[in-house]
Amino acid sequence: MSYVALAVLAMAAYGTTATLLKVGLRTVPPETAAVVTNLILVGAALGLAVYRGQTIVGQLSWGLHSGLVVLSGFTLSVAILSYYIALSRGPASVVMPIFGMSMAFVAVAGMVILGEEIKATKVAGILLAAGAVLLLTR
């Protein structure tokens, strides 16, 4: 499957996840929901690794890249726990668009930090995304 098809699948699955989660959080505390959903994620990732013949520990070293993966685990924890708590407290139609602005954050980081090509269309897309979030959260 191409990376574009996988990204579309991820978008649809995450949108579905947010909707299901918002309803579930009516009676399930966000911390409990985070543990349950992420245990399922870990199980799925382990299953995929076994299916693909990957080892988990064997793929890591004490180098920069493995350190960045570990650091991203911490930032992901902050992101997901904050998102779950926000979703338990506020409307999905406000929380999810704000959370979704991570795409614009990554686009800016890609251009500024990772040296990816800066194009007028990318800059316009970031501005339009910010405008869309502003309109969706009103």
Image (spheres, rainbow, N blue to C red):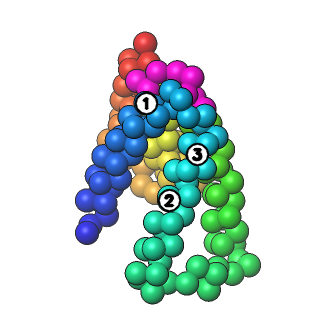
Q: CA distance from mark 1 to mark 2?
A: 19 Å
Instruction: Tell me the residue that label 1 is attached to.
Output: 23
Q: Quadrant of residue 17?
A: top left
Instruction: Tell me the residue that label 3 is attached to.
Output: 34
Q: Residue at x 46, y 57 (%)?
A: 116
Q: CA distance from mark 1 to mark 3?
A: 14 Å
As drawn, 132 above or below 66: above
Q: Judging from the image, what secondary structure is the residue with disc 3 in? A: helix
Instruction: Tell me the residue that label 2 is attached to.
Output: 41
- Type of amino acid under label 2: Leu
- Type of amino acid under label 1: Val
Q: Residue at x 71, y 77 (%)?
A: 63
* Stretch in magenta: 85-93
Residue 80 is left or right of residue 41, and the answer is right
Q: Position of residue 64 (x, y in %)?
A: 69, 72
Residue 123 can be seen, yes or no: no
- Type of amino acid under label 3: Ala
Residue 54 is left or right of residue 74, and the answer is left
As drawn, 53 above or below 22: below
Does the magenta portion include 5?
Answer: no
Quadrant of the image for the N terminus? Answer: bottom left
Q: Judging from the image, what secondary structure is the residue with disc 2 in? A: helix
Does the magenta portion include 92?
Answer: yes
Q: CA distance from mark 3 to mark 2?
A: 10 Å
Say the numbered circle drawn on residue 85. Answer: none
Q: Residues within 10 Å of mark 1 (few under 14, many from 20)?
A: few
